[in-house]
Amino acid sequence: QVQLVESGGGLVQAGGSLRLSCVASGSIFSRNTMAWYRQAPGSQRRLVASITSGGRINYEEFVKGRFTIARDNAKNTVYLQMNSLKPEDTAVYYCYAAVPYELTYWGKGTLVTVSS
């Protein structure tokens, strides 16, 4: 059983920055595809960014140039550096892992609130 624990959320003013962390346990981390999703109130959960075991990175258009995803396999951790935050970035941010073979897991989420 894989467990994902997010941290780093909080309240920040527009234009500010936060770094989210997700620590994984219960799998060989280097083999996982990792991703961040977010869900705003009244909205469906949507992809923010992903990084494969081989280092291929994908960003959704609405965060390109502002957010950076990275992983540290030695620490079993994936990060999301969020800069130039906007009020519309307010959401619960969820860590996601795809584990060989075709198993997926979710963290419980961390709340990011961006004030104007």
Image (spheres, grey):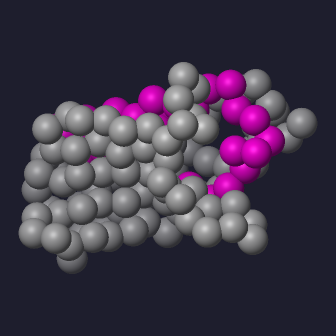
Q: Position of residue 46 (x, y in %)?
A: 53, 59
Q: Nearer the viewer, residue 64 or 105?
A: 64
Q: Position of residue 32 (x, y in %)?
A: 18, 54
Q: Is residue 69 left or right of residue 93?
A: left
Q: What range of the chain is rendered magenta?
A: 67-93
Which residue lies at the image location 14% right of the left edge and 38% below the top edge? 54
Which residue lies at the image location 56% right of the left edge and 44% below the top edge? 8
Q: Is residue 88 left or right of residue 80?
A: right
Q: Position of residue 71 (x, y in %)?
A: 29, 37
**Dividing the image into 4 quarters, which one contains the N terminus?**
bottom left
Which residue lies at the image location 10% right of the left edge and 69% below the top edge? 101
Question: Is 33 located above or below residue 60 in the figure?
Answer: below
Image quarter of residue 114: top right
Q: Is residue 15 left or right of residue 115?
A: left
**Dividing the image into 4 quarters, which one contains the C terminus?**
top right
Question: Is 5 located above or below residue 62 in the figure?
Answer: below
Q: Is residue 92 magenta?
A: yes
Q: Position of residue 85 (x, y in %)?
A: 70, 32
Check the image and name the residue furthest to the front.
61
- The reply to whether residue 79 is in sight is no
Question: Is 63 located above or below residue 52 in the figure?
Answer: above
Q: Is residue 16 magenta?
A: no
- The reply to whether residue 93 is in sight is yes
Count of picture labels: 0
Check the image and name the residue furthest to the bottom.
1
